[in-house]
Amino acid sequence: MKKAGRAAGLSEGKYLTMGVKESDDIVLWAKEIVQNDENAQIVLHGISMGAATVVMTTAKHPQNVVAAVEDCGYTSAYDMFTNQLDVIFGLPEFPIMTCVDIVSGIKTGVKVSDAAPIKSVPGIKVPIMFIHGTADKHLLADFAH
């Protein structure tokens, strides 16, 4: 039976961590693949949160990963949520996001601010293709730096 992602289906975990712990899961899956085929060449692909997870995973240099595709991910979950607070509710970052960061750290062991794929980009050593649309201007600018 195929396992679903973290906190879904038959998998472990109660909470999603916006790619932080999920990236560790993918490193373990790559190791499992290599145990079954030491010559495997693995390409990672993810969309949205999966794309952010792929970026964070690739920077951890999992075995036999030769390339990755990041399709419409985010640069920082904290920044993304802060933007949505403003756009949808007209609310400021402080004190809401500070509280969210603290509570998520307590409940999941991972703060929302830890989910920042942009910080992983310099550590990536394999080719990675970034796919974004024209509406993602702020994200493209972040990755260009």
Image: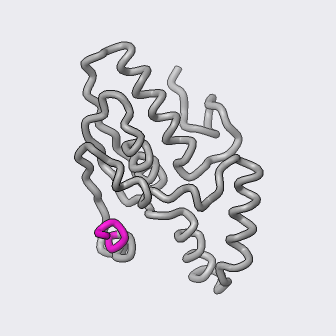
Q: Which residues are magenta?
A: 140-145
User: Which residue appears farthest toward the bottom when viewing the image?
Assistant: 90
Whether 11 is drawn above or below 79: the answer is above
Q: Is residue 101 left or right of residue 6?
A: right
Principal SS element in the magenta part? helix
Whether 125 is drawn above or below 86: the answer is above
- The residue sitting at 29% across, 69% down in the picture is 144
Magenta segment includes 71? no
| Front residue (pair 137, 64) | 64
Magenta segment includes 143? yes
Q: Is residue 125 left or right of residue 115?
A: left
Q: Which quarter of the figure has residue 59? A: top left
Residue 84: give x, y in percent of width and height: 58, 75
- The residue sitting at 38% across, 21% down in the picture is 33
- The residue sitting at 62% across, 47% down in the picture is 16
| Front residue (pair 79, 2) | 79
Residue 80: give x, y in percent of width and height: 53, 69
